Amino acid sequence: MRNLSAFILCIISFINGISCDSIEIQDDGPATLDSPITFTVINRYPTPAPSLEYRIKFDQFPQHDKTIVSSSVVVEYSVIFESSLTPKADKYTMQVDVWFLGVDSRSVANASHTFELSDSLVGSITRYQRISYEYLVNNFVSTEMPVKLTAEIADPSGFFTGRCGIPSANITYKWIINGSPQEESSKVIEPTFSEPQLNNISVIVSATKTNGSRLIQKSGSFNITLNSKHPITNATIDGPTEVKVFERLQLDFKIHRGTPPFQYRYFFSMDQPNSIDESGKMIGINESSFSIIKTFSEKGTREFHIALINDVSAYRMEMNIKVH
């Protein structure tokens, strides 16, 4: 009977354009054992019920089963899985059954969710470099300036890092760059990678904290690989500044500093509205030298603009070409 009632409500929801897949479960993990993980249940099932009952169950951790009665369609539940009571760090499953509370109490929706528990601290290394270049992606960095590296523990509750009155743990950092231990021992370091190469960076983070009568000690290793490249800082154009109508114009370019591959885009224009007579597509090259060939069918002065790009820089050049 309970399943039939839920089925009927699901059919009504479908007629009203609402999906029967109405329960979404999220978590802020993966979480380190002995620290909190928070589950968020989002209920999109349409019901005028003054209150709902969220029945949360863990097959392998029945001690953490909980029933929450709430009029809200979003509920949160924070749990600490102690290492002494958890078989191992692994992925586990929970179930949530949502009940309508009323004269005819019934289950209206249910869902399962997989979450991950870790023995180690979980986190990452973030990188930041003050460079005004919109194409800087995929962990490329310039050789011309320091890179700010930050070891970030994934700790939404502030259990290790401290927050809202929660005392922080004693946290230490050991950085290793390209196999060499670094003297810096803080959360943030700012090395400079002066040569084009792949740079392997790791940091070992250790945290020690007393929680009640328990001493909690955790560590983790975070890693990132950065590809350092020389930016384009110098380039030259070799070619005539005057040509005749229908005469072949050849402009030869040389990139004197910068790590390939390169891309370039160019256009010619005149001092008149809507006068761009060519808007080149982005062209990729692996060489530092290339040529552009062009002819013109009308007299006048053309403004030539070109942008040279690699993974860490953009370099712009311009010149005037007189056509007579």
Image (cartoon, rainbow, N blue to C red):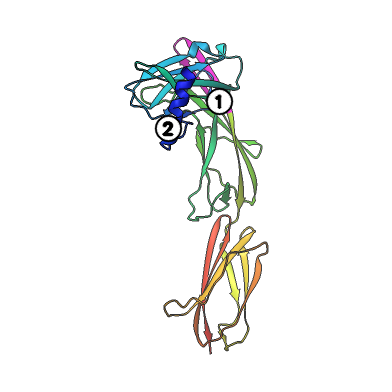
For residue 274, say whether it is visible: yes
Q: Nearer the viewer, residue 57 or 198?
A: 57
How far is the residue under mark 2 from the one under mark 1?
26 Å
Dividing the picture into quarters, in which one does residue 99 lie? top left
Given this view, does label 2 or label 1 mark the residue nearer the observer?
2
Q: Residue 10 at x, y = what percent? A: 45, 29
Tag 2 near tag 1, CB within 8 Å: no
Dividing the picture into quarters, in which one does residue 246 lie? bottom right
Q: Is residue 218 magenta?
A: yes
* Residue at image location 55% in from the left, 15% down from the top: 59
Q: Residue 54 at x, y = what percent? A: 42, 19
Q: Which mark is residue 13?
A: 2
- On screen, residue 190 above or below 169: below
The stretch in magenta equals 207-220
Judged from the image, the secondary structure of the residue bearing numbered disc 2 is helix
Circle 1: residue type: Thr
For residue 36, say whether it is visible: no
Q: Nearer the viewer, residue 197 or 111?
A: 111
Q: Residue 184 at x, y = what percent? A: 54, 35
Q: Nearer the viewer, residue 135 or 11?
A: 11
Judged from the image, the secondary structure of the residue bearing numbered disc 1 is strand
- On screen, residue 19 above or below 279: above
Residue, disc 1: 114
Which is nearer the N-term, disc 2 or disc 1?
2
- Dot 2: few (<14), some (14–19), or many (≥20) neighbours within 10 Å? some
Q: Is residue 272 left or right of residue 83?
A: left
Q: Which mark is residue 280?
A: none
Q: Residue 108 at x, y = what percent? A: 44, 23
Circle 2: residue type: Ser
* Residue at image location 41% in from the left, 78% down from the top: 273
- Dot 1: few (<14), some (14–19), or many (≥20) neighbours within 10 Å? few
* Residue at image location 48% in from the left, 14% down from the top: 65
